[in-house]
Amino acid sequence: MSSPSPAPPACNGITPLQQMVASCSGAILTSLFVTPLDVVKIRLQAQKNPFPKGKCFVYCNGLMDHICVCENGNSKAWYKAPGHFHGTLDAFVKIVRNEGMKALWSGLPPTLVMAVPATVIYFTCYDQLCAALRVRMGDCAQEAPLLAGAIARVGSATVISPLELIRTKLQSQKQSYRELTDCIRSAVQTEGWLSLWRGLGPTLLRDVPFSAMYWYNYEKGKSWLCEHYKTSEPTFTITFVSGALSGSIASIVTLPFDVVKTRRQVKLGELQAKNLSCQDSSSTFSVMSRIVAQDGFGGLLAGFLPRLIKVAPACAIMISSYEFGKAFFRKRNQERILGPLQTSNT
């Protein structure tokens, strides 16, 4: 009679610290692969409609959206580089030829400062919550990814929101950290602590439904593919395909909210950069109505193809690398636990 194997060190056989390491590596890999696409997109946008000083635009490395402010004439600024591009491929070639390969990853370091901790918080919280909810929800355990994904996104977005405000202010004005601290302290004294979370509402309206749908569809797709290919453990290909498909579905469904969120976030970013009042009383529905009145219903689907092209590979790379990292640590933990037992039996 064989003795029962020791319990795993945490849910799914890995510790929270190992989950953090896996998600961190996934965030870095995703940024490295997807950032060049956004750099090229911003260059093309800046060429067609130059960004005037003090204006904001949205930059996304595949993991998070960031508000960037055009504040100086630095020729190295990746959103304001010289050159005339005739398309995406032409932009890639000319950027590499004229500025070197590094230019495709311009703006990556400051983005990673927030993207990595946000991703670590998000993925680790999701796994921990999902494992706990599956146990407590009983017959409704299949819906656990839906709820866990939504809660995890609320948590990560809430933590990162003040950092986004600080980043916007630093980028718009050449301030020392002491001046920035005084500015934030003054804003808190004048308008309260909630002033540090301006723009959080529009972000949550898009990201929470996206996260809920993404994780639900991902877990369903992964289970179906595992059954189809008769495997107990998902392979890299299965997680990659499941991540791409679930990310695509979620991005399409939430696209109108993405359009609204982008417009409101850009407006708030410009007001923050100028230290003006950021009170925005317009509701999501009123912003949608304004967009429909100006651009028709097609305005709510603006940027459909660029968003899909970016989100699908970003989700696929992130989740597959994350699952690969977890599988690596799980196998290592099992070898560490079974090693002494096998030694004692011999």
Image: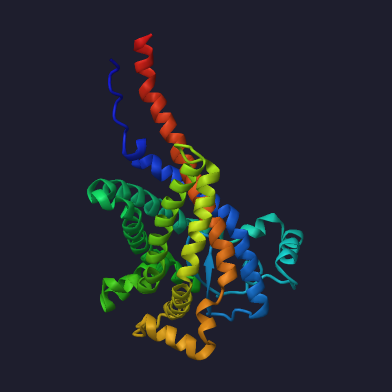
Identify whether 191 is placed above or below 334. Answer: below
Identify whether 23 is placed above or below 249. Answer: above
Identify whether 332 is placed above or below 267. Answer: above
Is residue 250 in sight in this rendering? yes
Camera-nearest residue between 286 and 164: 286
Q: How is the image coloured?
A: rainbow
Q: Quadrant of residue 14?
A: top left
Camera-nearest residue between 38 and 278: 38
Residue 166: x %, y % from top left: 41, 67
Q: Quadrant of residue 145?
A: bottom left
**Residue at x 50%, y 68% (from the top left corner):** 252
**Residue at x 57%, y 62% (from the top left corner):** 310
Residue 42: x %, y % from top left: 61, 70
Task: Report whether 15 appears left or right of 95.
Answer: left
Residue 188: x %, y % from top left: 29, 73
Which image quarter is the N terminus in? top left
Which image quarter is the C terminus in? top left
The residue most toward the bottom is 293
Is residue 118 in sight in this rendering? no
Residue 123: x %, y % from top left: 39, 51
Camera-nearest residue between 268 and 335: 335
